[in-house]
Image: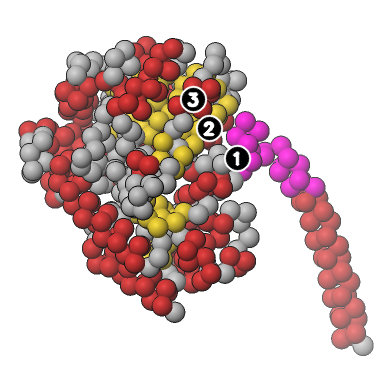
Amino acid sequence: MLKTVTNLYRSRLCKSHENILKMSTKVASSNNSAIDKKFALPSRYGESKESVWTEYIQLAIDYKPLNLGQGFPDYPPPQYIMDALAKVSNQSDYMFHQYTRGFGHPRLVAAITKLYSKLLGRGINERTELITTIGAYEALHASIMGHTEAGDEVIIIEPFYDCYEPLVRYAGGIPRFIPLRLKEPSDGRLSTSADWALDKDELESLFNEKTKSIIINNPNNPLGKVFTEDELNHIADLCKKWNVLCISDEVYEWIVYKPNKHIRIATLPDMWERTITIGSAGKTFSVTGWKLGWAICPANLMKNLQTIHQTSIYTGVTPIQEACAVGFELEMERLGTDECFFVSLPKELEAKRDFMAKFLLDVGMKPIIPEGGYFMLADWTPLEGKIDLNSENDPEKDYRATKWMTKNIGLQGIPPSAFYGPDNKKLGENYIRYCFIKKDENLQKAAEILKKWRDS
Ligand code: PMP
Ligand code: GLN
């Protein structure tokens, strides 16, 4: 009897507990929807969407493929740069561990302005014409935010480094895309990034009174195109004609394969006045995790970048800047010689580039030989029959192919449609981007994975 009563009591208790739970869930869900609604991502940021990096880095963590996706070396940077950082970290002088000057650590600012005064052929003012940033990302962010009014048009050349488009949109600007178009070589040779060019008339047709800026990436990621003097002059002439700013992302400035030459657009006649040149220590010294970048431009433009920087970041990382200053000072002493890292790095990478092109060709893909940078696009569609494209749901074919390859053959590349605007994604879909700043043994492994897959 007692047992029955207890059970009854228990079941009533459970019921009322359940009801309370139901009620509180109801309140919570109505609260949640109110919370969700009120605290949604502000509409100026568009829809909340993962970038290709967020998605593919997680994919690499989950599936542990051989990672030729995200661009970074899988071997150590130069010894002197590691030693410089180790030395700074052991300094007992408090100054090396506390806030440094907001617009750039003095020793680094001195080194960068000295180097770029030479490269740009003019004296760069340390105080007013240079800012150091948290990676080239922050320099891009400050340049775009600091120069885009709502409704301004910004010309972006496709394929483009993927953050340009959202940054322009966040700033209220309107991206106007123009693709580099492939002109297949007629003599049957392998195509190179030089075979991808802008149509001059098409570019001209994009410029108008609303055009505020053009973003160029030279050498280009993901294609590896190094713009010629003629191409840069055409862009420069249009910038001058329409009074347009040029944001020039030159993070791969030292990674250019002979006989190509890196020309800084800021050095072309009357372009200094309207160019922001952006660089990255991540690429310059092979230390992508150090996240140090810079922007160089005339003082009137720099004021705008400083305004954004001083409230969002305020100051960069002191020991990283000190160590990079040491790196620049050393390299400046041997600039242009074979010992200079800026000379030896592209030499070392050229052999890796050629090795990759050969193994991609051997398995039936069609690589595009880059003139600069450390990425290679390859047409994967000759192998399409070996990929189950229906196993993934993404709208773009290259996303499905690269995900399938990561999960099924253990090799990761990046889908190039991520580097196109909404209307031109098709132009990237037949390609995959592989990074070749990797140990020879890992490039060899990649070759073996692909061969085994081709023969399976
Ligand atoms: N621009 C391009 C073209 C890049 O490839 C990258 C990636 N490294 C960046 C900018 C950002 O550079 P950082 O890592 O210095 O922020
Ligand atoms: N720039 C590098 C690349 O293109 C890294 C990108 C990133 O981590 N956002 O792969």
Contact (CB < 8 A) between labels 1 and 2?
A: yes
Q: Amino acid at mark 2?
A: Phe
Give the amino acid at mark 1: Asp
Answer with left or right where residue 11 lies relative to residue 412: right
In the image, 231: left or right of 423?
A: left
Q: Indicate which disc residue 201 carries.
A: 3
Q: Which residues are magenta?
A: 30-48
**Total marks placed:** 3
Residue ID at (17%, 40%): 342
Q: Pick whichever of labels 1 and 2 is earlier in the sequence.
A: 2
Residue at the image point whose x is 59% and y is 40% from the top: 422
Residue matched to label 1: 423
Comparing 168 with 235, the one in front is: 235
Would you say residue 32 sits in the magenta stretch? yes
Kindly identify which numbered label has been placed on residue 177: 2
Identify the amino acid type marked 3.
Asp
